[in-house]
Image (cartoon, coloured by chain):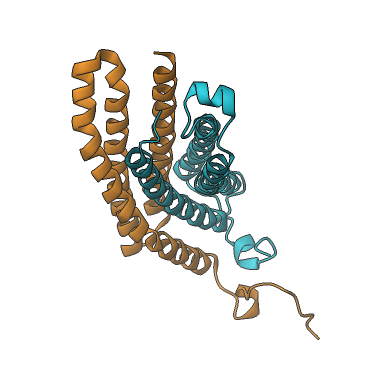
Amino acid sequence: MASTDSTSEAATDRHPAELNLALRSLRTWASMAALALLVYFIANVRLAFTLGVNEEELATQGPNLGALALALVVLVLVVGFPFIFAILTARCANKAASSDNFRSIVQALIWSRRFMVACAVWLVTQSALLAIIFALGLWT
Amino acid sequence: MKPITNRYPSASDGPKLTQAEQQSRLLTWAAYEANCALPVIFVLMVMSGLLSLVATPIGLLSLLSHGWKGGFTCGLAAVCWYLAWELWQLHRAIFALYQSPAVHAMIPVVLHIRNVFVAVASFFLVWFLMHLAIRMI
């Protein structure tokens, strides 16, 4: 769709070297942010597993499956979206740097905006979850 | 007869645009898209600032009472300050791009977006190290 558009094909004159360097740097750090989000997700899955129970209860009764499922759904929603948006920003920045395509820069801007929206949602959800956990005394 | 294709209207549909005109249109579009991000940047900046205001005294108290282990909370507070600062700089860069769209005005915008990603990656890295330290102690 976008690749067949003659506007994008015609406007492929060389970008300034600084812009290409900045785009390559953006690609690297967007990938790093995606990796960090993945590590955060894996660490939180373990934390969700022990939510609301102590080690002895976990060994004898097993995890609270309802709380575990809810925590996993919330985690996938609030971490999955920024992860996907960071990957897509990196992809568009890479395309823009390698093909001197201005349209890809705009797409990278759009994906990074969605990443920031997802981060804001994550921040609100995380604060609310922590407040609920402390208020209910679920922190073990 | 011209075949019907499923694509957006482009420059070939109307009078042929020069390279400079196309570049100018794309830059205006980029400036518009970047400008649409300003509300969320502002909200994220305020939230990050509030978080850093809360985390800084907690981090300092924790540093005094728990020694080096409290350093992680201080690290989180520092990353929050950095994120808020970068978002403010990004806000300014986007405003400058919107005022006068040019390829060179695009470079600071891309660099500050990169720095936002650096801050977010650092936040999760410090958080993970803190998580590990709590588990190990």
Q: Residue furthest bottom?
A: B1
Residue drawn 53% across the image and 35% down it: A41
Residue drawn 29% across the image and 48% down it: B47
How many marks overall? 0
**On the rendered image, what quadrant is the C terminus of chain A found in?**
top left
Is B85 left or right of A54, judged from the image as shown? left
Q: Position of residue B37 (x, y in %)?
A: 39, 59
Q: Position of residue A44 (x, y in %)?
A: 50, 33
Q: Position of residue A13 (x, y in %)?
A: 56, 54
Residue drawn 47% across the image and 46% down it: A16
Is A125 left or right of B71, judged from the image as shown? right
Foreground: B60 or B27? B60
**On the rendered image, what quadrant is the N terminus of chain A found in?**
bottom right
**Chain in cyan on the image:** A
Residue drawn 54% across the image and 65% down it: B19
- Choose top left, top right, bottom left or bottom right for residue B68: top left
Q: Position of residue A62 (x, y in %)?
A: 59, 29
- Choose top left, top right, bottom left or bottom right for residue A136: top left
Up the image or down, B33 lies above or below A13; here it is below
Chain B rendering hue: orange
- Choose top left, top right, bottom left or bottom right for residue B100: bottom left
